[in-house]
Amino acid sequence: MTTSNLPEEGKKSLNFIENIIEKDLKEGKNNGRIHTRFPPEPNGYLHIGHAKAICLNFGLAERYYGKCNLRFDDTNPVKEDVEYVDSIMEDIHWLGFDWEGRLFYASDYFPKLWDFAIDLIRKGLAYVDDQPADVISAQKGTPTQPGIESPFRNRSIEENLDLFERMNKGEFPEGSKVLRAKVDMGSPNMHMRDPIIYRIINHPHHRTGDSWKVYPMYDFAHGQSDYFEGITHSLCTLEFEVHRPLYDWFIEQLKDSDYRPRQTEFNRLNLTYTVMSKRKLLQLVKEGYVNGWDDPRMPTLSGLRRRGYTPESIKNFVNKIGYTKYEAVNDISLLESAIREDLNLRSPRVSAVLKPVKLIVTNYPEDEVEMMTAVNNPEDESMGTHKIAFTRELFIERDDFMEDPPKKYFRLSPGKEVRLKNAYIVRCTGYKKNEAGEVEEIYCEYDSQTKSGMPEANRKVKGTLHWVSVSHSLEAEVRLYDRLFNIENPNEDKEADFLSFLNPDSLQVLTGCRVEEVLKDAKPGDKFQFQRLGYFVVDPDSEKENRLIFNRVVSLKDSWSKISSK
């Protein structure tokens, strides 16, 4: 019995996959080896759903002192690109995982897969079919009716070998012939009804060029690649559960020892207000509904990274929703909560005014600049403090002033007092409008005894406002990102175009915003809490355009829960 790879017990409850692994280890299966793999198709950027699979495969390898391979399932050259390969590797590293040199491609095994296909033909277990795809599909029958055998099913071994060789030489056009496994046309499992295992594709491959004219199907390449690499636990999402008998059938024909990889399925990650289909995400990019794969509204890992999400927040979210055998749709507010919790602990607090209006402290000296002390993060004293300049002329949020406020309005209005955070209590004495009737200046007087350390520092007022100095603040652009779709399940209505559910307010660009001077050296990726407004990150465009541009990561509170409950 092998138990050396078992982790210390009692740390957390186990999910069903961990229970399987621990049972295998205790029984000494695979000589105590744990070897997983993450097998993405390089036909798009990874999204949050892939993060769940990454965390599972790499996480289990770490937990049980095993190994995890990265293997690109590059069996369809028409849709694949080196750009996607590079982005996938970057995303995995960003999440904090590494394949430690075990980088593989399904194309590495094209010669072995070819040899296996030839072996199946010679054993009478594969044949070339000349019928078009729609005829083959119709002949497969239904789950309650057996399929009809192809008229080419009983071709001679010699003819099948000759045709398959000629298919790979490019003698036949795409769609004219396929290679099928000869399994069971009467099986209740549709995937076992003589599945296609090779098709002709006349398109250069990103790694093998024009060496091949036939390419293996996923079901044929996947399990065999697991076998070639010595994978012990092949972890797939639930839609592949019905594929498992075929996975096992191919392995049974291939294996020459007692070893065999075991496929186990878990539920995929689905989110409200989101689409996960690569086809739909590609459509959003190609048709310009978003600004690329890394648009902060996209559920891609590159989009979430640019939005300001951290690897820790994504891993914490994945751990919270867990792994089960039941499909579910997770509320996106759980993901947003995970990033709030993470940034609350690590983000410095600063002041930023997104829609500024001037506030003039009429009884404050015109030329005086007073440096106030602001705590960087009340959750972490080790982050210290910084200084913020207080002057006679300030900016506050336009929404923080009302001429004729309702009864429970605790911000600034004529005759009312508020505290300016880290500074003084002020009382509004008047305001001025422009010709358009908009308030352009607000006047107030400050109480010099209400600064921290002064006699009336603890005098209570109901409102506290953030602010910045007019002369000691920086101009910035702020991009307020919101959910990309305005209904919970944009995939629910199969008849409707998912694009019709796009949220027209998913991006609002604010110019002329003002932020503290302390942010003058902020770099792309730096994250802050703008007090009372939310969490924000410096966008990469800041470096390109040599100006400050911030993306809203998430608001301080979940405003959508109030909207959806109405």
Image (tube, rainbow, N blue to C red):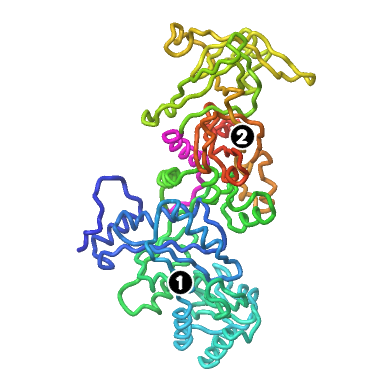
Task: Say which residue label 1 marks.
Answer: 246
Q: Which residues are magenta?
A: 325-347
- Give the side of residue 268 with respect to residue 432, left or right: left
- Give the side of residue 139 with respect to residue 226, left or right: right
In the rendered image, residue 17 lying in the magenta stretch gets the answer: no
Q: Is residue 557 visible?
A: no
Q: Quadrant of residue 20?
A: bottom left
> Looking at the rendering, in which quadrant would you find the C terminus?
top right
Position above or below: 210 against 453:
below
**Residue positioned 47% across, 87% down in the render:** 124
Task: Say which residue label 2 marks.
Answer: 476
Q: CA distance from mark 1 to mark 2?
A: 57 Å
- In front: 528, or 213? 528
Q: Position of residue 485 (x, y in %)?
A: 63, 44
- In front: 218, or 442? 442
Dot 2 amino acid type: Ala
**Residue positioned 46% across, 80% down in the render:** 111
Q: Secondary structure at mark 1?
A: helix
